[in-house]
């Protein structure tokens, strides 16, 4: 098994069975992505729709159908039409306004429903997207998304700090998990809050301890860019 595949397997086997591993493939080659798919990867996470994800999606051919495509980066309005045919889930819905823009384009992309996660700006950082980490902001967003015909809310995601001591991310993950639990009161369907996507290469272990059931790992699998 290739080295990348071995690292993927090692991380996958270290996680609890109910935690999904998203391989974050920003800046990674098609050959590297093939290696992790061959190693058993089921979720591919891309940050940029065009041209990066578009090109990889095309070059992978039939192999692309073996994985679930997750948009884990910010979605620009002018990329929505390009994103919808590629991604099986959009993890970064940061407002009701953005959700409405997506909803209007779903049928044109040949789909009826698109699963989404609400992004929480858990650290209240000016340079990051996401709703305020408050229950009132969450309720407003959940209820707004819930009114849209073509979107299905499945949970929350947050980034937390990119670098530094993983323990520094714990408070951000904890507040997001608390919102995740509180948000269940505002959804009508039993499966409306089932995914809590938190943690990256340096912090995914802490994220799992704080309740994440989906983690996004790039450098830990592929090595430094």
Image (cartoon, grey):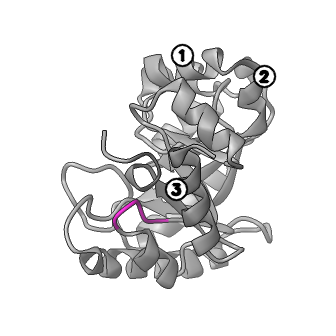
Labelled pair 3, 1 in contact (Cβ < 8 Å):
no
- In the foreground, 77 or 13: 13
Q: Mark 2 or 3 closer to N-term?
A: 3
Q: Which mark is residue 167?
A: none
Element carrying mark 3: helix
Distance Cα–Cα, label 3 vs label 1? 25 Å
Element carrying mark 1: helix
Q: Is residue 216 magenta?
A: no
Quarter location, residue 158: bottom left
Res. 69 in view: no
- Residue 200 vs residue 93: left or right? left
Q: Which mark is residue 7?
A: 3
Task: Say above or below: 142 vs 112.
Answer: below
Magenta part, dominant SS = loop
Q: Is residue 201 magenta?
A: yes
Please name the residue shown 63% across and 46% down the image.
Answer: 1
Q: Which mark is residue 62?
A: 2
In front: label 2 or label 3: 3
Which x, y percent locates residue 89?
Answer: 64, 43
């Amino acid at each position: 098994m290739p080295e990348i595949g071995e690292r993927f397997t090692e991380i996958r086997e270290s996680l609890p069975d109910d935690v999904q591993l998203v391989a974050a493939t920003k800046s990674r080659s098609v050959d590297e992505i093939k290696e992790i798919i061959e190693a058993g990867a089921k979720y591919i996470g891309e940050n940029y729709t065009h041209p990066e994800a578009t090109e990889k999606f095309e070059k992978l051919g039939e192999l692309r159908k073996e994985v679930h495509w997750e948009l884990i980066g910010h979605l620009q309005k002018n990329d929505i039409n390009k994103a919808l045919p590629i991604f099986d889930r959009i993890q970064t819905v940061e407002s009701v306004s953005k959700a409405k823009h997506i909803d209007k384009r779903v049928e044109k992309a040949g789909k009826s429903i698109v699963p989404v996660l609400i992004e929480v700006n858990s650290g209240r950082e000016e340079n990051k997207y996401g709703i305020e980490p408050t229950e009132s902001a969450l309720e407003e967003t959940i209820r707004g998304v819930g009114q849209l015909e073509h979107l299905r809310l499945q949970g929350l995601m947050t980034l937390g700090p990119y670098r530094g001591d993983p323990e520094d991310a714990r408070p951000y993950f904890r507040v997001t998990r608390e919102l995740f639990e509180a948000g269940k009161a505002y959804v009508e369907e039993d499966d409306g809050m089932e995914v809590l996507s938190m943690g990256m290469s340096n912090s995914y272990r802490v994220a799992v301890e704080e309740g994440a059931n989906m983690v996004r790992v790039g450098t830990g699998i592929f090595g430094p860019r």
